[in-house]
Image (cartoon, grey):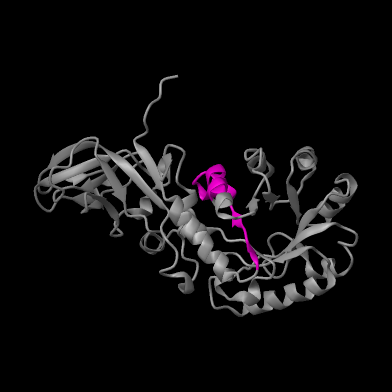
Amino acid sequence: MIEVPSPLRLRLDSRALIANWRWLAAQSGGAACGAAIKADGYSLGARSVMRHLAAAGCRDFFVATWAEAAALMPLPEGISLSVLHGVGASDMVAARTLPVRPVLNSVEQVARWREAGEGRPCDVMIDTGMNRLGLRVDEALGGALDGLCIETLLSHLASADEDSDQNAAQLAAFRAVREAVPARRYSLANSAGICLGRDFAFDLTRPGIALYGGTPRDEAAGQIRQVVYPETRVLQLRTVHKGEAVGYGATWTAPRDGRVAVANMGYADGYLRCHAGTGGGASWQGKALPLIGRVSMDLIAFDASAAGAIGEGDWLALDYDLPSAAARSGLSQYELLTGLGTRFARLWG
């Protein structure tokens, strides 16, 4: 097979990933610190993320679906993996075969696991106020979980990234369930929940976005390091004269004679049209290249007038610090990461 280089790449900083996990683990106090690696490790590559974090000491990982779990087989020795979406009727073959635990989310899933799970350990999600997945508190306290071998009893915070009264209410509800439902471990805090303090840590924390460079709350500002650095290659340099327009809809007109760098990337790669006109762009050898015109499916344009000797084939580093890119674009930090497409080569360093 001929190996063809991609005109897009993600430079991924393994040291920053590990440093972020270690900071989150320190904030977790005596609780173990796991890692959410769903959506293919927030698009970084779940297997690579697991490998780096396992080498650093992480032992507990979470994915969304059984297909994601199967893609990670075989697991490294000593690693625990849980599937957050539990078990549907069509999942039972995978659930009985893979060395992975389901996170049971409803009385129907509990019944299904009792019938076919052969007494194997499971995890259970309790809904303490988000009304997304999980057994209701009254169902858990009413005996729905009696006799199950529960490894980890979980809940999920709905508003941990805000100073909301809901955080204290969910904490109180989870404490009540902990007192009534036996499990080996209890887990409530996501990335933002870790920043709320050690009352939320219990036995296991489950960070996601903060591992990958996202800042979930102000308490993490300056502590979380950027992990993902998207880059795109210059496809063509063009001379544009004053008054000429660039791109679909003629949304940008050259204020003076200059040069435009057209690059291999667009909304098909997760770089959406909302980035245009927000002050973002890229850089080349430390020189800023503002994004101009409308983002196309797989082409974008930058004002390269001040970029000196930039040429075809040069690599541009996108402005992609997650908190600032989210503020500019209106996208969440999660969308900015998980939308990065499969045409990016992923290069760990």
Residue at the far top: name it.
Answer: 1
Image x and y of residue 175, in percent:
75, 75
Is residue 130 toward the left or the right of residue 40 in the image?
A: right
Is there any visible trace of residue 338 in the rendered image?
Answer: yes
Where's residue 226, x and y in %?
41, 57
**Does residue 32 show up magenta in the picture?**
yes
Quarter of the N terminus within the rendering: top left
Q: Is residue 270 above or below residue 330?
A: above
Q: Would residue 210 be visible to someone looking at this image?
A: no
Residue 315 to residue 22: above or below: above
Q: Residue at x 34, y 35 (%)?
A: 7
Q: Does residue 348 sit above or below 150 in this rendering?
A: above
Residue 25 coordinates in the image, percent (x, y): 57, 65
Quarter of the image where one finds residue 336: bottom left
From the viewer's side, name the closer residue of 43 and 254: 43
Q: Residue at x 10, y 44 (%)?
A: 241
Report the front residue among 141 and 47. Answer: 47
In the image, what residue occupies the spot 73% across and 72% down? Answer: 174
Left or right: 146 in relation to 193: right
Residue at the image position 41 percent from the left and 39 percent from the top? 344
Q: State which region is magenta.
A: 31-52
* Residue 36 among magenta residues: yes
Q: How many marks?
A: 0
Image coords of residue 346 (percent x, y) = 43, 41
